[in-house]
Amino acid sequence: MTLKKIITACACMMLLGCTIVNSSSILIGKQRAAINFEEVKIYTAPPPNFEEIALIQAEAGHDFKSSQDVMNSAVERLKKEAAKLGANGVLLSNIGRRETNSIGFTTGTATAVGNTAFGSGVTVMSQGRGYQTISGTAIFVRN
């Protein structure tokens, strides 16, 4: 593979990389049958007549997406985590941000012809990733 192809491949991977999402839960109540995540509602204040199912958290990160797109991905992941547990709501408790360290990749070549040497190299750096974090309590709201 030529150096030009390596540089092009690295640039494409960095620019087109997918959003990284993660979530987890701690069961504190009765788990129910899973539902479609689109049915899960987000609450900023406790609704009437609900029961707690689990403490849940989610995070999403991407180098080149807007903050709003990353937040939307984190909220979607939080809803999916709640839906797996049968919760039809999430009572938000925290929204934050987490940063990661920078990483880099360097490659180079050198060629000698007679008394002359030619060299080239490239360094690709990522400034680190900002993760949007969101957490709350998965709840089941009775109608």
Image (cartoon, rainbow, N blue to C red):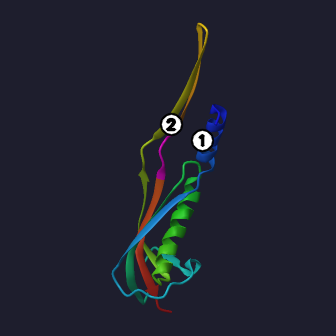
Q: Which residue is mark 2?
A: 105
Mark 2 residue element:
strand
On residue 10, the disc is 1
Residue 14, located in which quarter of the rendered image? Answer: top right
Residue at point 54% right, 48% down? Answer: 63
Is residue 66 part of the magenta span, yes or no? no
Vertical placement of residue 91 versus 60, above or below:
below
Q: Residue furthest front?
A: 114
- Type of the residue with mark 1: Cys
Q: Is residue 133 left or right of residue 36?
A: left
Over which residues does the magenta segment extend? 125-130
- Image coordinates of residue 106 in percent, x first then y, are 51, 32
What residue sits 42% from the left and 48% below the top?
100
Q: Is residue 106 left or right of residue 16?
A: left
10 Å crowding of disc 2: few (<14), some (14-19), many (20+): few
At numbered mark 1, what does the secondary structure look like: helix, strand or loop? helix
Quarter location, residue 45: bottom left
Q: Residue at x 50, y 62 (%)?
A: 21
Circle 1 Cα neighbour tier, 10 Å, few/some/many (<14 / 14–19 / ≥20): few
Q: Are marks 1 and 2 in contact (CB under 8 Å)?
A: yes
Question: In this rendering, does residue 46 appear at all?
Answer: no
